[in-house]
Image: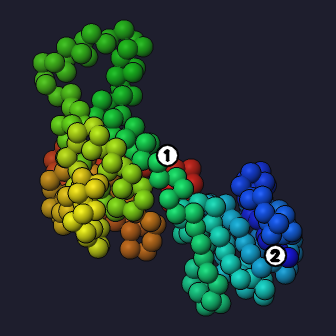
Amino acid sequence: MVKILHIGKAENMKRYTPDTSAAKEATVAEMSMGHTAEEYAAAMPDAEVIVADAIADISGALIDLLPHLKLIHSEGVAYNRIDTEAASARQIPVCNCAGMNASAVAEQTILLMQGLLKNILVNDRAVREGRQVTVKESYMAEGSLRELADCRVGLIGLGDIGKCTATLLAAYGAEVYYYKRNRLEPEDELKYQAMYLPLDELLATCDIISLHLPVTGETERMCDREFFEKMKPGGLLCQYLPGRAGG
């Protein structure tokens, strides 16, 4: 019988627990977020597994307080809120739900790109104030209203979410480029209709830059002054900021 310490919303555990004998036999201690390591440990001192909300902090102190711990599993795709060094020191695997939100985040990314291109907040306000004709005529005179098909879009990172985003962008007719540490095989570039560019060239070339990277020490402060200075003049940065870290 597996003993699970669940940190997060109890309804999540109920909703996604599989209908298997092993799952039914598991003992689960439910705890909401925001407690101390000591309080979590007291809820189930002999916990073998931690299942944690994507934004729950799993500290080294908590890991040290659970001598029988064998696995930590995040309900989300990120694990930057988990002390992976402390887990590694105990040889405790840390798992996530890779790819589970790829389609949803990709759709949200396209929505944000469209919102940037169409200046949707300002133009929505213009419609509500009865100025839509003036705004429309201004766009027509300037020729400044762009579509995704007019844009070169650069994806930094091409994991599950990035690949899903590339597929959607191709359907819109956008010219898609990507940068990642390990370039895809040619057949995969053809599959996702994405062309590789070194990072500096991608920043200088693309009209829209979209980030699809895990939160790590290497990526946390990636978008600094130098990053923006390398971007194409007038370029747009699209960064999906979900309520849950790493989405």
Q: Looking at the picture, does residue 151 appear above or below residue 145?
A: below
Tag 1: amino acid:
Ala
Q: Position of residue 29 (x, y in %)?
A: 85, 66
Label 1 secondary element: helix
Crowding at mark 2 (Cα within 10 Å: few <14, some 14-19, many 20+): some
- Which of the marked residues, 2 or 1, is nearer the chain's N terminus? 2
Q: Position of residue 4 (x, y in %)?
A: 79, 71
87 vs 106, left or right, is: right
5 vs 233, left or right, is: right
The quarter of the displayed image where residue 67 is located: bottom right
Q: Residue placed at 34% from the left, 44% from the top? A: 168
Give me the disc on residue 217.
none
Q: Residue placed at 37% from the left, 14% from the top? A: 127
Tag 2: amino acid:
Val
Q: Residue placed at 81% from the left, 75% from the top? A: 2
Q: Position of residue 121 (x, y in %)?
A: 39, 28
The quarter of the displayed image where residue 18 is located: bottom right
Q: Residue placed at 19% from the left, 21% from the top? A: 139
**Pointer 1: what residue?**
104
Can you say which quadrant of the picture contains the N terminus? Answer: bottom right
Label 2 secondary element: loop
Crowding at mark 1 (Cα within 10 Å: few <14, some 14-19, many 20+): few
